[in-house]
Amino acid sequence: MTDVTDDSVNGTDPLVALRCKSHTYPDGTVGMHDVEFAVHADEVVALVGGNGSGKSTLLEHLNATLTPDKGELRVTGERIIDENKRHARQEVGFVFQDADTQIVAPTVLDDVMFGLHNYGVPADEAEKRAHEALATMDASHLEDRIPHYLSGGEKRLVGLAGVLVLEPSVIVLDEPFAGLDPERSRLVAKRIRHIHTEGVSVVLSTHDLDIAAEIADRICVMADGNIIGNGSPQEIFYDEDLLNEANIHPPSAVRIARDAGLDIESQPVTEAELVAFLGQQSATTDGVGLAHFDGDTND
Ligand SMILES: Nc1ncnc2c1ncn2[C@@H]1O[C@H](COP(=O)(O)OP(=O)(O)OP(=O)(O)O)[C@@H](O)[C@H]1O
């Protein structure tokens, strides 16, 4: 069993600790097995892996939407059972891939306030907090809009605001960049990093490894319902055997560095890191031998 619930990280207990021997869906499909996973304070974790590798199944265990056949979930140290699932839901906010499933009210502001009403927060305070959460997401201009008519990226930001307003310890996002154009993806990624600077840990799944490399502190690789790799972006994205086993390709910066045979000790995983390295090189070599890097680094 891959144990990534090491309690000693930062010397603190994890915010969320999941041990799952297996999760079997009603039709008999095993969605996940032999997984141990923890989320610590002050981290952004990206789950990566091919289609059907178990990312959504794992994420949905983190706020007890799904429960293990055998195993346990602890949230801020409290063992979650049927009677206290509310604790998991309060501490672990979930933003679904399909933003429409989370829309419940006729305007964006009402939608963001909805969860607070459910928790009995007085209307004026709920409104104040909803304004703040939308401002944090740079989405104040959307307050009076009809949620269903927003673009995909706008819906993501509103969904994030609706979860952030409940002040969870951890926010879980299932494929937050799916269906977004590159510019909207970058905007959502930036807001996710911003949420993190406000002291909220983030766990997300994504097929966009360029963005994962940019925003995650830790990468977990899933294959066949199991975690097969866990480490820093450098450790994971320079492990060719691991990526082959998971059938995924490294971020473009890693591919370029590797294909060009660059001997880079610092192991760049983002374009910015690669460009910084190339800049240093050209400063010391006057650009000799680096002319072929002048082109687009995106493919
Ligand atoms: N509701 C369900 N009923 C039956 N099987 C399911 C259900 N949801 C997921 N599965 C199965 O569980 C396994 C893991 O699926 P999961 O959705 O967790 O993968 P994923 O990594 O999130 O995939 P993707 O990247 O395609 O979204 C797959 O074999 C999938 O077919």
Image (cartoon, rainbow, N blue to C red):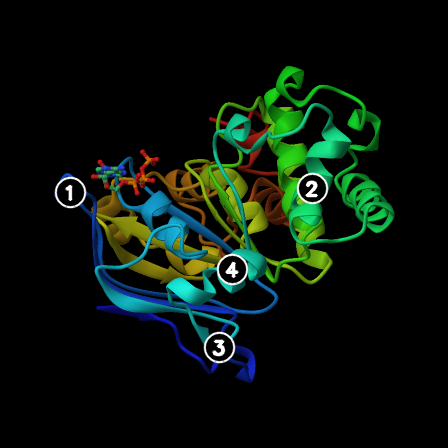
> Residue placed at 48% from the left, 29% from the top?
98
Label 4 is placed on what type of residue? Arg
Q: Quadrant of the N terminus?
A: bottom left
Left or right, residue 241 beside residue 179: left
Mark 1 and mark 3 in contact? Answer it, CB < 8 Å.
no
Mark 3 and mark 4 in contact? Answer it, CB < 8 Å.
no
Determine the CA span between mark 1 and mark 4: 27 Å
- Respond yes or no on whether mark 1 lies under 8 Å from ligand 1: yes
Badge 3 marks a residue whose secondary structure is loop
Q: Earlier in the sequence, mark 4 or mark 2?
A: 4
Badge 4 marks a residue whose secondary structure is helix
Badge 2 marks a residue whose secondary structure is helix
Where's residue 274, x and y in %? Answer: 57, 45
Which mark's residue is nearer the viewer, 3 or 4? Answer: 4
Q: Earlier in the sequence, mark 2 or mark 3?
A: 3
> Residue placed at 55% from the left, 32% from the top?
293
Residue identified by numbered label 2: 161
Q: Is residue 100 visible?
A: yes
Residue identified by numbered label 3: 77
Along the line of sight, which residue is nearer the eye, 186 or 260?
186
Mark 2 and mark 1 in contact? Answer it, CB < 8 Å.
no
> Residue placed at 67% from the left, 23% from the top?
147
Label 3 is placed on what type of residue? Gly
Mark 4 and mark 2 in contact? Answer it, CB < 8 Å.
no
Determine the CA span between mark 3 and mark 4: 14 Å
Which mark's residue is nearer the viewer, 4 or 2? Answer: 4
Where's residue 97, x and y in %? Answer: 48, 34
Label 1 is placed on what type of residue? Thr
Along the line of sight, which residue is nearer the eye, 95 or 78?
78
Residue identified by numbered label 4: 86
Q: Is residue 282 visible?
A: no
Residue identified by numbered label 1: 29
